[in-house]
Amino acid sequence: MGKAFKYGDNVDTDVIIPARYLSTFDPAELAKHCMEDIDAGFAGAVRPGDVIVGGSNFGCGSSREHAPVAIKGSGVACVIASSFARIFYRNSFNAGMPILESGEAAERIRAGDEVEVDFARGAIRNITRDESYRAEPFPPFIAKLIECGGLVDYVKSLGE
Amino acid sequence: MGMTMTQKILAAHAGLKEVKAGQFIEAGLDIVLANDITGPPAAKEFARMGAKSVFDPDKVVLVPDHFTPNRDIKAAAQCAELRAFAREQGIVNYFELGAMGIEHALLPEKGLVVAGDSVIGADSHTCTYGALGAFSTGVGSTDMAAGMATGRAWFKVPAAMRFEITGRLQGWVSGKDVILHIIGMIGVGGALYKSMEFVGPGLKSLSMDDRFTIANMAVEAGAKNGIFEVDDVTRAYMSAHVNRSGRPEKRARAYSPDDDASYERTIGIHLPDIRPTVAFPHLPENTRAIDDVGEIPIDQVVIGSCTNGRLGDMEAAASILKGRKVAEGVRCIIFPGTQQIYLECLRKGYAEIFVEAGAVLSTPTCGPCIGGHMGVLAAGERAVSTTNRNFVGRMGHVDSEVYLASPAVAAASAVAGRIANPDEVVV
């Protein structure tokens, strides 16, 4: 369970982690500057288990995998959005950063709401408002990737 | 059911007779690309996968172009990691400073991508090569690592939007204005997960440089890829840029969409209707025709990048800056995309024109576009830039502003000291 940080549509990877900090891939280092250009207070306020809620096209822009790595390094348990930009979508699975697509949750959840996420079931509960939302189920191929433990383990399993 | 150009290339690389939008496939790769920011993490993931050697040292391309020439010690360390990996793996197409260019200008110039190829790159603007009739898309470092290890990648076959181009470009209007106009029309999520396929009789008036610019910014509409139908312009470019660095010349293969291919939406683009176009902060979709821009004073002009650092772009800038001066109080930075383009700027006299005008001519680098180095903006500063993104903080301070435009508009703006129509400056 955690608190929701709420943002709008088209949250780009430049504001998630500005390019000036891309001289490292260390999650803790990147986390210090996570969301810096859209919400300068984020890094100081975020606590393990919190969630980020965005609108449509979350994670658009640069292909930097540093973006989901920075969010994961911040302790965020899940990113919920009505839709994700495609590279960010792929990168999140590869970086082990849970994401869920739910237009309803993206619309209803307000900043500061207490939210509980059951990633495996795609169930989102808003404790503050006493509401529940469903996330889009993952396509079978993606579900298989998640089950394998991500792309690194999937490729490993091919070699075995 | 027929297939789009993208679907045909994916089917061919997956060894399937047919693919449909929404289907998950694994496809073979002809080129796997990374740079100094995305390459080092990919090398680490590659090792974590238990991989020992890349699937084909001729097909992995590594280009240290982002924070180079090394901007600080950390950037130097990242480049050293990339260099060490390239040496250890015997990567044929590793481009050291001096041979290095901005990756998406460099690969086509070196003949490393041809029509019909399937390409992934750990850089979102990898979609640029769609200009050649290739399937090409951006991925992150882990996907790139898996591509290096296996020579394959998984894809969800994209649905598509069809852009039917008619007429000819008018006056100073270029490929940049066409793609800004389209993004303004459909929005930054307008082609989310989809292919943007460009066809029609108007293609023949678009130079390869125009097409590279258009395909380059497909990602700015959320697209998985942008792709152009192959014609004589493409074929002439490919025969002039044959890969002589590695194995024998690659065979290009041109794919046209089937007559009954399924497109979610078809949009007609009549080139004579397009005006020089500017995208206002802070999204590429915030476009206005030059006539509706108003009085916007500027501090900096940036001409170059993977979007607009090609010879045609340099030529447009030179034709406006020739015999004119950059306005007082404006800093103008011009950076050709590759060493070859830089050399052409010297030979054709553009370099002299730029320096005489009071602009600086920089080595190829991604630095200014991403607020990395070589032209970072302070709080409150405003730039006109031929790059691809004008997000908050993209080129520097979070309170700076970026206006995206063509090289002609950017050069005219440098002279006028405010965003200007080239027609006002070149009378």
Image: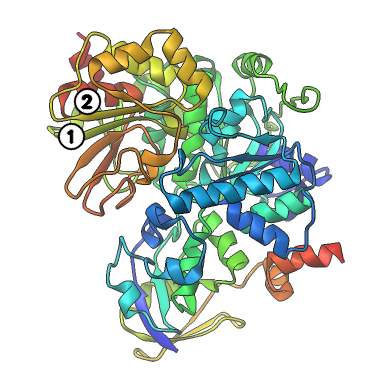
Q: Residue B244, percent across and down?
A: 72, 21
- The residues bearing labels 1 and 2 have C-alpha atoms spaced at a distance of 8 Å
Q: Residue B386, percent across and down?
A: 35, 32
Label drawn at residue B413: 2
Image point 31% across, 21% down: which residue?
A: B408
| Residue B239 in view | yes
Label drawn at residue B298: 1
B31 and B83: which is toward the camera:
B83
User: Around disc 1, counting alpha carbons within 10 Å, would you say few (fewer than 14), some (14 to 19), or many (20 or more)?
Assistant: many
| Residue B274 in view | no
Image point 25% across, 18% down: which residue?
A: B422
A45 with respect to B311 (left or right): left
Q: Residue B228, percent across and down?
A: 59, 29
Q: Mark 2 falls within which chain?
A: B
A123 with respect to B424 (left or right): right
**Tag 1 secondary structure:** loop
Residue A35 placement: quadrant: bottom left
Labels 1 & 2 near each other (Cβ < 8 A): yes
Label drawn at residue B208: none
Is tag 1's residue or tag 2's residue first in the polypeptide sequence? 1
Image point 13% across, 25% down: which residue?
A: B328
For badge 1, the amino acid type reads Ile
Q: Residue B379, percent across and down?
A: 19, 50
Q: Mark 1 falls within which chain?
A: B
Q: Quadrant of the N terminus of chain A?
A: bottom left
**Tag 2 secondary structure:** helix
Image point 37% across, 66% down: which residue?
A: A33
Does A73 sit above or below residue B163? below
Residue B175 placement: quadrant: top left
For badge 2, the amino acid type reads Ser
Q: Quadrant of the C terminus of chain A?
A: bottom right
